[in-house]
Image (cartoon, grey):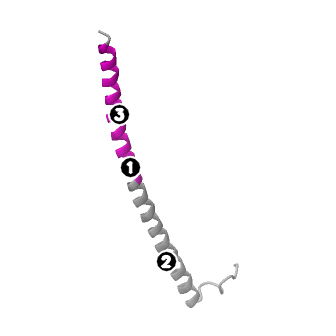
């Protein structure tokens, strides 16, 4: 009879350990996915910065704005 509580506790601890392993795996997967999202966002920001620079240059060439650094 003394063996039953130990086995019950060990059984519950094994279940908790199994669930914790799944949580760790899920967290690892989420970290990878978030990293990919951050890299994609950085790429988008770089492209937008280049587009903004090109638009500024085009506006200056068409004389739609003043010289660089000129506040209107």
In the rendered image, residue 58 lying in the magenta stretch gets the answer: no
- Residue 31, given in percent of the width and then of the height, sits at 41, 52
Q: Secondary structure at mark 3?
A: helix
- The percent coordinates of residue 3 (x first, y second) are 30, 14
CA gap, disc 1 and disc 2:
35 Å
Disc 2 is placed on an element classified as helix
Q: Is residue 31 above or below residue 21?
A: below
Image point (56%, 90%), residue name: 61
Q: Which mark is residue 28?
A: 1
Magenta span: helix, strand or loop, mainly? helix
First-in-chain label (1 vs 2):
1
In terms of image quadrants, where is residue 53? bottom right
The quarter of the image holding the C terminus is bottom right
Residue labelled with disc 2? 51
Give the position of the N terminus as an image quadrant. Answer: top left
Residue 9 on image: x %, y %: 35, 21
Separation of disc 1 and disc 3 at Cα? 16 Å
Instruction: Tell me which corner region of the image, top left, top right, bottom left or bottom right, holds residue 36.
Output: bottom left
Answer whether labels 1 and 2 touch (C-beta < 8 Å): no
Q: Secondary structure at mark 1?
A: helix
Q: Which residues are magenta?
A: 3-31
Q: Residue furthest front?
A: 2
Residue at position x 38%, y 49% in the image: 28
- Image height of 37 relative to 3, above or below: below
Residue identifier under label 3: 17
Packing grade of label 3 (10 A; few <14, some 14-19, many >=20) is few
Between 10 and 44, the one lying in front of the other is 10
């Amino acid at each position: 009879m003394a063996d039953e509580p130990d086995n019950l506790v060990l059984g519950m601890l094994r279940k908790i350990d199994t669930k914790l392993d799944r949580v760790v795996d899920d967290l690892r997967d989420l970290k990878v996915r978030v990293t990919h999202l951050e890299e994609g966002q950085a790429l988008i920001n770089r492209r937008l910065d280049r587009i903004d620079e090109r638009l500024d240059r085009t506006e200056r060439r068409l004389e739609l704005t003043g010289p660089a650094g000129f506040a209107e």
